[in-house]
Amino acid sequence: MAGDPLLARAREVWLEMSGVAMAFPAVGGVAVAVSARSLLCPPGWVGIVALGDAAIVTVSADSWAGIVREGLRGLPLEALSDADRLCAVLPVTEVLGPTSLAYLDECDFKPAGFDTVEVLPAGHADLAALLASVPVDDADECGLADITSDAFVVRHGNDVVAAAGYRRWPGAAHMCVLTETSQRGRGLARAVASAAVADGLANHLLPQWRARPEPSRRVARALGFCHLGAQLSIRIET
């Protein structure tokens, strides 16, 4: 798997996000590095990203590195995205995730055509209205408020009921998708996400789909995304 070009590109994205010179171990396992600038996790947390048969971990202080290395020593890779197993070996006080990480090559893309997909600028009032119409957790989870691309939307009447876009990461298009609650199950998420993916590919970016809910993962699979790993953030007692 280490020779997979899609996996190699995905790893490059997260290595750039780590904020420090490090690498995924060539023969599997876990690499731990100190990085105050890591974007693998919130500031002051421990960030874990497992892709393929290896993982990288960032900690924000030298004093934590030894604790984390010792706690993770000997753990199988799948345990790094299992909060219960991590809590058994580290003084964990809070957990974010895990989220699945999936990626797509242009040759694997399965577009979902939809004639009425409209393009709006990020920050458009109709996009804000969609975000305000769903539960706060859904609005926060989808990330649409922070997209840097255009928004690709479907309307019901005058109202935007589904939207997708992406945040530009180093070399990647991080997908953000949301459908209004009463409109779900109609294929709208797939339609708007397909337009966003096509835009990301046209800009020579690697589409990335990060998700926790299974319905979101199903949309990714339908578009051709391949699950490659997981991300988890933990706060540890100091």
Image (cartoon, grey):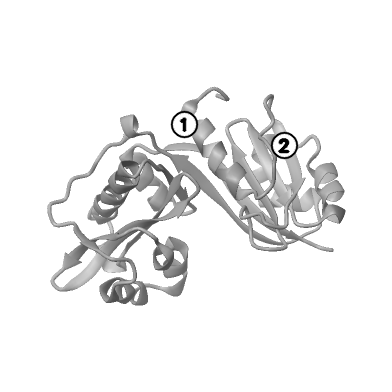
Q: Residue at x 31, y 67 (%)?
A: 181
Q: Quarter holding the N terminus?
A: top right
The residue that appears at 51% across and 46% down in the rendered structure is 100
* Foreground pick, 63 / 20: 20
Kind of residue indicated by mark 2? Val
Question: Looking at this view, is 8 or 160 the one in front?
Answer: 8
The quadrant where residue 176 appears: bottom left
| 208 is higher (above) or lower (below) than 124 | above
Earlier sequence position, callout 2 versus callout 1 = 1
Q: Provide the secondary structure element on which disc 2 rests.
A: strand
Note whether 138 is above or below 79 in the view shown. below
Pointers 2 and 1 in contact (C-beta within 8 Å): no
Q: Nearer the viewer, residue 65 or 95?
A: 65
Q: Position of residue 67 (x, y in %)?
A: 85, 49
Residue annotated with mark 2: 30
* Mark 1 lies on residue: 6
Res. 147 image quadrant: bottom left
Q: Is residue 31 above or below residue 43?
A: above
Q: Residues within 10 Å of mark 2 (few under 14, many from 20)?
A: many
Locate residue 187, reporting x and y percent. 24, 52
> Residue at image x 18%, y 56%?
117
Mark 2 vs mark 1: give the one in front: 1
Q: Residues within 10 Å of mark 1 (few under 14, many from 20)?
A: some
Amino acid bearing label 1: Leu
Examine the rendered structure and indicate whether residue 142 appears above or below residue 194.
Answer: below
Distance of label 2 from label 1 (alpha carbons): 20 Å
Mark seen at residue 216: none
**Residue shown at 47%/44% (left/top)?**
171
- Residue 157 horizontal/vertical position (percent): 13, 71
Helix, strand or loop at disc 1? helix
